[in-house]
Image (cartoon, rainbow, N blue to C red):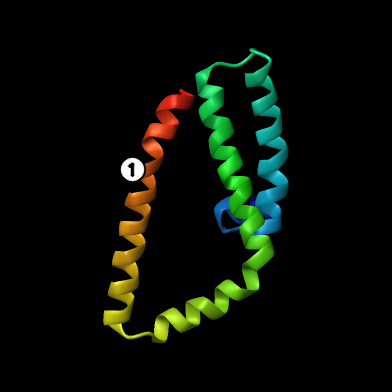
Amino acid sequence: MNKIISNWREGCTPLSQAPGRKKLVVAFPSAVVVSFLYVIGVADSLAKMLAIILWAYALIGLIETLIGGRLVSLSAKWDIMAGWKKFIISVFTIVFALFCFISLIPIAAKLL
């Protein structure tokens, strides 16, 4: 019995390491149900946070499903890139993300 359980556990991977299609299939229906419950007023703000997390996870699954093969080649190119180029790209990415975040604060304030 113990051997059967250990074999079963070896075959299971965490959802975060699962393929994009599995993430999409699991997260999308869950996000729809939780969002529906929040909209009709059955759930509270905790459900709203859960719905947002599930929608983000579904979006990650969709992106991995659509461009999953290309990410492997990009990863290989990133690994062989010079260190100074990685630094420049990383700094620009962080600055752009901060700019977007700060720009969206007034919009989010109006919505809430």
**Kind of residue at badge 1:** Ile
Between 103 and 16, the one nearer to me in the picture? 103
Q: Can you say whether 6 is above or below 31 in the image?
A: below
The tally of labels here is 1
Can the viewer see residue 12?
no
Q: Can you say whether 82 is above or below 37 in the image?
A: below
Residue 1 % position (x, y): 69, 49
Judge the density around disc 1: few (<14), some (14-19), many (≥20) Cα neighbours within 10 Å: few
Can the viewer see residue 44?
yes
Who's the residue at 30% across and 58% down the image? Answer: 95
Q: Can you say whether 109 is above or below 90 in the image?
A: above
Residue 61 % position (x, y): 63, 54
Residue 111 % position (x, y): 48, 26
Rendering quarter of residue 29: top right
Residue 10 % position (x, y): 62, 59
**SS of the residue under disc 1:** helix
Rendering quarter of residue 6: bottom right
Left or right of 101 on screen, residue 63: right
Who's the residue at 56% across and 72% down the image? Answer: 71
Q: Can you say whether 40 is above or below 26 in the image?
A: above
Rendering quarter of residue 4: bottom right
Who's the residue at 58% across and 53% down the image? Answer: 60
Q: Which residue is mark 1?
A: 102
In the picture as drawn, the residue positioned furthest to the top comes out as 41
Who's the residue at 55% across and 80% down the image? Answer: 73
